[in-house]
Image (spheres, grey):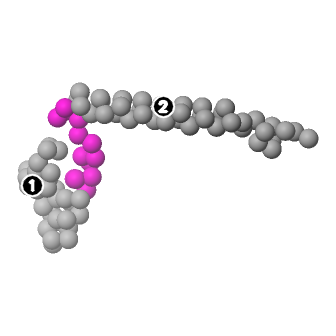
Amino acid sequence: MNTHALGYWLNKKRLTIYPKIIVAVLLAVLMGIYVFLKLSGDNFYYANDFSIFWTVSRLSLEANPAKAHEYLYLLDKVRKIAPVII
């Protein structure tokens, strides 16, 4: 009988070490993301592609689908929604 398949490898020492390692790695990743976002400042915009799709769909619902092809009009609408993005 294979004792490793039954979970005998998971002893008390490993039950205390593995969660600590997982938490340490998770905290390191989160700190890396936090530092990256802080150092990038205003030059890093996330999810900025969705604002264009949302604005175009909103224009279509307002019965102005032709306005979605006018770049300056679309840009003005996007800036009103999220002035930080563009």
Residue 21 seen from this side: yes
Taking the magenta stretch, the answer to whether it contains residue 49 is yes
Q: Earlier in the sequence, mark 1 or mark 2?
A: 2
Q: Amino acid at mark 1?
A: Lys
Question: How packed is label 2: few (under 14 Cα within 10 Å), some, or many (20 or more)?
Answer: few
Query: Is the stretch drawn in magenta largely helix, strand or loop?
Result: helix
Q: Residue at x 76, y 35 (%)?
A: 9
Describe residue 45's horizontal placement relative to residue 22 as left or right. left
Taking the magenta stretch, the answer to whether it contains residue 45 is yes
How far apart, in angstroms, are the residues tagged by discs 1 and 2?
40 Å
Describe residue 69's horizontal placement relative to residue 19 as left or right. left
Which span of residues is magenta-colored? 41-53
Question: How packed is label 1: few (under 14 Cα within 10 Å), some, or many (20 or more)?
Answer: few
Q: Residue at x 84, y 38 (%)?
A: 3
Vertical arrangement, residue 80 with respect to residue 86, above or below = below
Q: Residue at x 19, y 59 (%)?
A: 55
Q: Amino acid at mark 2?
A: Val
Residue 35: image tag: none
From the viewer's perspective, is the residue at label 1 or at label 2 nearer?
A: 2
Q: Position of residue 1 (x, y in %)?
A: 91, 41
Vertical arrangement, residue 62 with respect to residue 38, above or below = below
- SS at circle 1: helix
Residue 70 seen from this side: no
Mark 2 lies on residue:
25
| Numbered circles on residues, count | 2
Q: Position of residue 28 (x, y in %)?
A: 42, 30
Q: Position of residue 6 (x, y in %)?
A: 80, 44
- SS at circle 2: helix
Picture quadrant where residue 77 is located: bottom left
Looking at this view, name the residue that lies furthest to the front.
12
Mark 1 lies on residue:
80
